[in-house]
Image (spheres, helix red, strand yellow):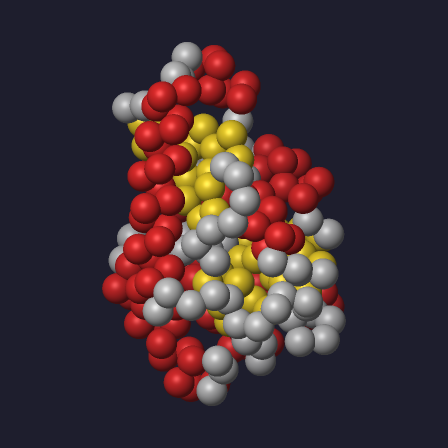
Amino acid sequence: MFRDRTDAGNRLAHALAEHVTGQALVCGLPRGGVVVATACAMALNLPLAVYVVKKLGAPGNPEFAIGAVGEDGEPLLDSEIIKRLGVSEEYVAREVAERRRQIRKQVLLFRDGESLPGPLTRPVIIVDDGIATGSTVVAAAQGLRLRGATRIVGTAPVGSRAGRDMLAPHVDDIVLLQCPEDFWAVGQYYERFEQVSDAEVGSIMRSFRRSTDIE
C-alpha cells in the first residue's frame, strides 16, 4: 500500500533512477499523475511538465474507457470494446469533441496555454498514479512522440497486466512498482486516494516552476 500519491512518487523515483539519462523530462498526466510526477521530479532533480490527456468514456459509464485523446494526434479508440458495446460513430465523435474542449481548458489552466517547454528532443518519463486499461498513457506516448521525444519511459506506482501489455509497444521501457494479477482499481493500492482538482494541479505546476526556476 502507498500512503498517498506523494509517497508513491518518492518510491517510484528510486526505481526510475537507473532509467534517467541526461536531462529527461518528467511528464505528469492530470490529475492524480501530476502529484506523483512532482514527487519524482523533485527527488530526481528533473524538470516537470504536464501533458493533458483524457479518457473517452462509454455511454452511461464514463469511467469505463473506450479510448483516449491527448493534446496531439488522432484519438486512440478501442475498436473491440466499441463494437462489443455497440457504441455509435456519432457518440464517439461527440465524446472526442467534448474531451478536446476540456483539454484546451486544462492546457490554459495548467500551462497558461503554452506549449511544453522546448522541443522535446530528450527522453520523457510519463507518470500516472496508476495504469488500468492503459489507453490514456498510450495516447500520451503517441502525442509526445509527435512532439519529438527521443525515448519514452511509461511509469506508475501500480498497473494492471492488461494495461502494461497495451502500453509496451508504444514506449521504450515500462517501470511499475506493482503489477498484480488481481488488479481491480488504482485506488485500492492507496491508503489515501482523494480526487485531485484542476485548481490543485494548476497550483502544483505554478509552485514547481517558482521553486525550481524551470520555464
Q: Name the residue rendered at 34%, 23% in the picture.
A: 91
* Residue 107 in sight: yes
Q: Name the residue rendered at 39%, 17% in the picture.
A: 88
**135 is higher (above) or lower (below) than 143:** above
| Position of residue 209 measured from the top left corner of the image (x, y, whole percent) | 43, 80
**66 is higher (above) or lower (below) than 196:** above
**35 is higher (above) or lower (below) than 78:** below
| Position of residue 172 measured from the top left corner of the image (x, y, whole percent) | 73, 52
**Left or right of residue 156, residue 71 in this image:** left
Q: Name the residue rendered at 68%, 49% in the picture.
A: 171
| Of 119 and 178, the residue lying toward us | 119
| Of 149 and 36, the residue lying toward us | 149
Q: Name the residue rendered at 35%, 69% in the picture.
A: 112
| Position of residue 169 measured from the top left corner of the image (x, y, whole percent) | 71, 40
Quadrant in which residue 121 is drawn = bottom right
**Left or right of residue 161, residue 115 in this image:** left
